[in-house]
């Protein structure tokens, strides 16, 4: 009988080597190569099955009808593109304790009001899951619970009449066809492939929870994110009541939408009154400016906070929620065009509420907050700053300006510094500024 071939696989990047090495030559990780039997991998991948696909003219292929149904949470429906698509595989990641299991257990309870749902717990006992379900109101007769880590047993259970399932978590499952340990690259990759095949063949919507690494990415091979239909990440601090759910990949919707949740005694729920969550109505002080950013189709009013202080040694530039490279660029612009000596000061930027901004419409508000802190002069608490700042000092237009101004008016703002006049009346007085120097004169 031929001896099974053995190779070694890196648990960080999936690199394979015919011999063991202390350091992976691909990603540089130490002591990350584990032994894997080649025959076990072949069996798991179904090598030997003879299937031949037939090419068909694209004009003869019928369009798929996307069947969507509600998850019971408006914010999650928004992130998914209008609801949960039948037969989709969704990967949910986030820091430990941020609320992944709590939210998905509640979602499973919501869906089970109309459909049969399976919740697979590979980390907690059935009694622990029941206590949590009772606390968040997810005790429903159509919600079935399975405490199991063996993939073959889970697949047998999914052969029943289920329309949705939750796997908590993907790194704790194992397949008997593989010799590798649970959580290894081989196990995670092959188990995800099998779950994807079950979801497509049986038209079951499956959520899988994934642990994240210190760098903030899903633990396991990067191919895991390419295999699933949707990748969702929880953002925020576990000590804060607000959580932000962001889509990094969505085959059935946009990735620009975010969901905002609030942690309560009954678990995570869609946050109400979102418009007032990211700025305060307290007495305005120096170093604070307001702006409006677009997260998908939703406008959000944000408070930008800045602190400028004397530097001891090399000046520091630190930002939370704002691109640090762009902050350095804006400070260089102020030094060059306005001759402000920021090379002798530390500059810190923070976006209130824990949200992260990826667009450039907040540039003008960042500059206004920095100048306010530098001069120690407060800005009017009912003034907005909206605009992108270029390297030559111009203030450029941003998309959806009218929508932003309408949101600001709804939140009680009376003035706005903008790069152009709005197309419609927004109920807010606008001051047009085409370059940064005019903003300073206005301030």
Image (cartoon, rainbow, N blue to C red):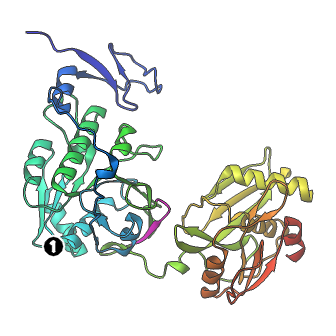
- 194 lies left or right of 288: left
Name the residue tied to disc 1.
Answer: 139
Q: Is residue 256 magenta?
A: yes
The quadrant in which the N terminus is found is top left
Callout 1 secondary element: loop
Where residue 239 appears, x then y in whole percent?
44, 64
Rendered position, 364 above or below 183: below
Rendered position, 20 above or below 270: above
Residue at 16%, 15% (x, y): give it.
4
Residue at 79%, 65% (x, y): give it.
395
- 39 lies left or right of 318: left
Where residue 369 appears, x then y in whole percent?
75, 68
Rendered position, 59 above or below 131: above
The magenta span reads 255-262
Instruction: Determine the image quadrant of residue 424.
Output: bottom right
Where residue 152 appears, x then y in whole percent?
11, 42
Residue 410 versus residue 54: which sits nearer the camera? 54
Residue at 32%, 24% (x, y): give it.
9
The quadrant in which the C terminus is found is bottom right
Residue most extreme to the bottom: 427
Instruction: Determine the image quadrant of residue 276.
Output: bottom right
Residue most extreme to the right: 339
- 182 lies left or right of 237: left
């Amino acid at each position: 009988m031929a001896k099974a071939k053995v190779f070694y696989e890196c648990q960080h990047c999936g690199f394979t080597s015919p011999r063991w090495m202390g350091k992976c030559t691909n990603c540089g990780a130490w002591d990350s190569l584990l032994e894997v039997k080649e025959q076990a991998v072949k069996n798991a991948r179904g090598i030997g099955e003879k299937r031949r696909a037939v090419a068909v003219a694209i004009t003869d292929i019928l369009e798929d009808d996307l069947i969507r149904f509600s998850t019971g949470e408006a914010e999650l429906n928004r992130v998914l593109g209008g609801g949960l698509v039948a037969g989709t595989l969704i990967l949910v990641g986030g820091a430990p304790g941020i609320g992944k299991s709590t939210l998905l257990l509640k979602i499973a309870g919501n869906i089970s009001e109309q459909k049969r749902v399976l919740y697979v717990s590979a980390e907690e006992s059935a009694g622990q899951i029941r206590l949590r379900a009772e606390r968040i109101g997810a005790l429903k007769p159509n919600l079935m619970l399975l405490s199991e880590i063996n993939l073959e047993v889970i697949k047998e259970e999914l052969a029943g009449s289920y329309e949705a399932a939750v796997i908590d978590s993907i790194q704790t499952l194992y397949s008997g066809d593989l010799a590798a340990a649970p959580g290894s690259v081989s196990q995670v990759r092959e188990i995800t492939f099998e779950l994807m095949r079950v979801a497509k063949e049986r038209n079951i919507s499956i959520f899988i929870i994934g642990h994240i690494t210190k760098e903030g990415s899903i633990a396991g091979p990067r191919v895991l994110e390419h295999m699933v239909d949707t990748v969702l990440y929880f953002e925020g601090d576990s000590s804060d009541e607000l959580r932000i759910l962001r889509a990094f990949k969505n085959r059935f919707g946009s990735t620009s939408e975010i969901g905002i949740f609030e942690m309560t005694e009954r678990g995570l729920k869609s946050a109400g009154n979102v418009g007032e969550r990211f700025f305060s109505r307290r007495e305005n002080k120096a170093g604070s400016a307001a702006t409006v950013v677009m997260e998908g189709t939703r406008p959000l009013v944000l408070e930008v906070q800045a602190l400028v202080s004397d530097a001891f040694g090399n000046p520091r530039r630190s930002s939370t929620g704002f691109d640090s490279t762009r902050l350095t660029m804006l400070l260089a612009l102020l030094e060059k065009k306005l001759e402000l000596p920021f090379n002798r000061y530390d500059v810190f930027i923070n976006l209130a509420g824990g949200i992260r901004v990826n667009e450039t419409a907040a540039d003008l508000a960042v500059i206004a907050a920095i100048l306010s802190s530098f001069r120690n002069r407060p800005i009017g608490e009912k003034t907005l700053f909206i605009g992108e700042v270029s390297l030559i000092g111009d203030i450029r237009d941003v998309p959806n300006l009218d929508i932003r101004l309408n949101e600001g008016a709804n939140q009680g703002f009376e003035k706005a510094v903008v790069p152009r006049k709005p197309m419609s009346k927004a109920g807010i007085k606008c001051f047009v500024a085409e370059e940064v120097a005019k903003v300073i004169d206005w301030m």
